[in-house]
Image (cartoon, rainbow, N blue to C red):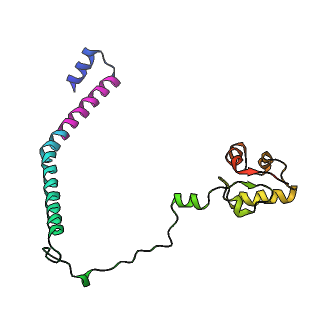
Amino acid sequence: MSWLYRLQQRLALTGAEAAALLLLGAGLTAGLVVRQFQANDAPAAATLFAEADARWAALDARADTAALAPLGTAEAPVPADSVEVVPIPTSGFADTPRRRASAAAPVRMNLNTADAALLQRLPRIGPALAGRIIAYREANGPFRRVEDVTRVRGIGEKTLEKLRPYLYVEE
């Protein structure tokens, strides 16, 4: 370690600078050693790609010959009675977003006569908020203008801007 101390004195480095320099050198050396081992152990990428291409080409050729062969003369035909039929369920799945959006697309509605199901078709309005709109309407009477819906807890200016194209008020 005396050589390290002499080098530190000659380069006028502090203890922390010398330690950092030593750590960087050790990291660089370790990285080069690992890279050398990886280069010797791993097969060349071209070899891997060539093997994969050969396997795909063999599968493709087998599929082409089976497709071009007359019916029933394929190399290893599968008996029809050994094929397992798997039923595919067609119900019980959630609707895709596209179907859901078209099925419950928002419509223009009168804020004073819309029921909870109709209100829920509006953007950002769920069952709880629809219930609050109806409760506010029952407690305070009909809305006089569309902007009055912001008096309902949970509806602010941003929500009103999303709802405005779909709402109108008739008493």
Task: State the image coordinates of residue 84 (x, y, percent, origin top left).
Answer: 30, 80
Does the segment drawn in magenta span residue 122? Answer: no
Q: Is residue 166 left or right of residue 71?
A: right
Does the segment drawn in magenta span residue 25? Answer: yes
**In this view of the protein, can residue 44 be seen by the observer?**
no
The residue depicted at 31 percent of the width and 27 percent of the height is 20
The residue depicted at 67 percent of the width and 46 percent of the height is 162
Relative to residue 21, is residue 86 depicted above or below?
A: below
**In this view of the protein, can residue 28 be seen by the observer?**
yes
Determine the image quadrant of residue 36: top left
Observer-nearest residue: 72 or 130?
Answer: 72
Task: State the image coordinates of residue 65 (x, y, percent, origin top left).
Answer: 14, 66
- The residue most toward the front is 70
**Quarter the C terminus occupies:** bottom right
**Quarter the N terminus occupies:** top left
**In the image, which residues are magenta?**
15-34
Magenta highlight: main SS: helix
Task: State the image coordinates of residue 41 (x, y, percent, origin top left).
Answer: 13, 47
- The residue most toward the bottom is 81
Determine the image quadrant of residue 51: bottom left
Observer-nearest residue: 36 or 10?
Answer: 36
Q: Is residue 31 left or right of residue 154?
A: left
The residue depicted at 25 percent of the width and 85 percent of the height is 81
Observer-nearest residue: 64 or 84?
Answer: 64
Callout count:
0
Determine the image quadrant of residue 102: bottom right
Task: State the image coordinates of residue 124 (x, y, percent, origin top left).
Answer: 65, 53
